[in-house]
Image (cartoon, helix red, strand yellow):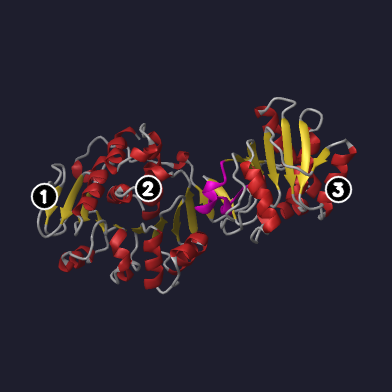
Amino acid sequence: MQKLFDEVASLDKRCYEEFGLSEDILMEHAANGIAQFIRAEFDKKSSVVVACGSGNNGADGLALARLLHGDYNVKIFYVREPKSPMATLQLDRAHAIGVKSTIELNECDVLVDALYGTGFSRDFDYEAQAVMQTINNLDAYKIACDIPSGIKKNGECDKDTFVADMTLTMGALKKSMFSDAAKEFMGKIRVIDLGISRTTYESSSNWNLLDMDDLKLPYRYLKNTHKGTFGHLAVLGGQKVGASMLSGLAALKFGTGLVTMVSKSEPLNMPHAMMHSPTKPQNTTALALGMGLGYDFDKKILDSCLDNSLPIIADADIFHMDIVLKLLKRKNIVLTPHPKEFVALLRLSKIANISIQELQKNRFKYTKEFCTKYPLVTLLLKGANVIIGQNEQYFINAYGTSALAKGGSGDVLSGLIASLLAQGYSALDAAKNASLSHTRLMQNYKGADFSLTPEDLIQGIGNL
């Protein structure tokens, strides 16, 4: 697990005030980190263009050009003259050893984006648009210095944002790098140390990036057991019973001892391994509802299923119904909306009346607002990068890809979460581990990304 930060200026300041490091020292380490990467990946005499802005991101690029000069064919490209004191100093140093500048962006082996950095907060003007379009069209290996130019602090991205093959970020990971929109532009990501170890540089943070090493699967360590040892999940059936079946099958495959479909009548083609009941079984240890619920369901069954304090996973149609407001008062509950459903939930809970587009621009903000108002609830907001929040703890799973963008994929995720709840995981742990498992199933799939189906995901659970 890695920490995420809104900004690192305060971390830089701590280096100056507590550790006796200067801005110049940090900058030299930043530039040297990029130089080491280029030296490891590209032969000497390769052509390198460093596109520099007028501020300190540009200063990092100017220092890089100086470090590579002599071994590489390095040129500096800048739209505007340096303005910050460090940028001016670094330009003087680069010129002093003979680094050349260019006014044209031509083909090169490596192009480094050191134009705007994390302080970017506006839209590109016409001149910047033209430059960014030219840069993005160049046939070169593209490296972003700290963050691709065009990504704003909230994760919103200009349409001409720099498209990186590799982002070498300074000191620590920034939260804005893991918005849904930023995923198109980040490429691979590495963190560069700035003269002290990363653990020393970083402070505490409520936001974290999940790693696959954080995954804890429901292995069976006990020997004297029976099927009831591993929980009994009740899945509420509804109008589109196929979605509930997918969740139930995923839960069985992920270790739940018993799974029962709760509905007025037994659906056709019920899987043999699943049971059916018109009422919630007495030994139920967790509930799953909302998947394929629709509006043609037995309200009495729904009400009876909720008359308890059992752990719950709620998904899909439930977010458009007033009954969800009752669920928000419960403990040990996981909500798994996609953006359209979360917008409906925000409206019902009177947090915000916004469009999907507004949500996607500010996913971090509205996740935090919801979790602040409902601190007992665990929220899993689906997207290109999944956000999981509970109270003041937030986690991002950035492993997902478009392979999971298919009907039924979310029902499998619900089943994974439900399975862990039934087996005794806390709501937050169930959400984190199920989400990581979901994305690992996608990674393990051997077929073409467009061909992945919910059944493929379920089949792959046994190989996690």
**Three-letter amino acid code at disc 3?**
Leu
Q: Crowding near pointer 3: few (<14 within 10 Å), some, many (20+)? A: some
Residue 103, horizontal then vertical, whole percent: 78, 44
Residue 404: give x, y in percent of width and height: 37, 45
Q: Which residue is mark 2?
A: 405
Q: Nearer the viewer, residue 412 or 218?
A: 412
Q: Is residue 40 left or right of residue 178?
A: right
Decide if residue 294 is in sight here.
yes
Q: Residue furthest bottom?
A: 350
Alpha-carbon distance for marks 2 and 1? 27 Å
Kindly identify which numbered label has been placed on residue 89: 3
In this rendering, position of residue 69 left or right of residue 284: right
Type of the residue with mark 1: Leu
Which residue lies under the disc numbered 1?
268
Residue 367, position as x, y percentages in the image: 47, 62
Q: What residue do we see at 59% from left, 56% from top?
A: 158
Q: Earlier in the sequence, mark 2 or mark 1?
A: 1
Q: Is residue 415 above or below residue 125?
A: above
Which stretch appears magenta?
Answer: 170-187
Q: Residue 83: name its quadrant.
A: bottom right
**Number of callouts:** 3
Quarter occupied by the C terminus = top left
Tag 3 secondary structure: helix
> Residue at the spot x=42%, y=41% of the render?
215
Mark 2 vs 1: CB contact within 8 A = no
Mark 2 lies on a secondary structure that is loop
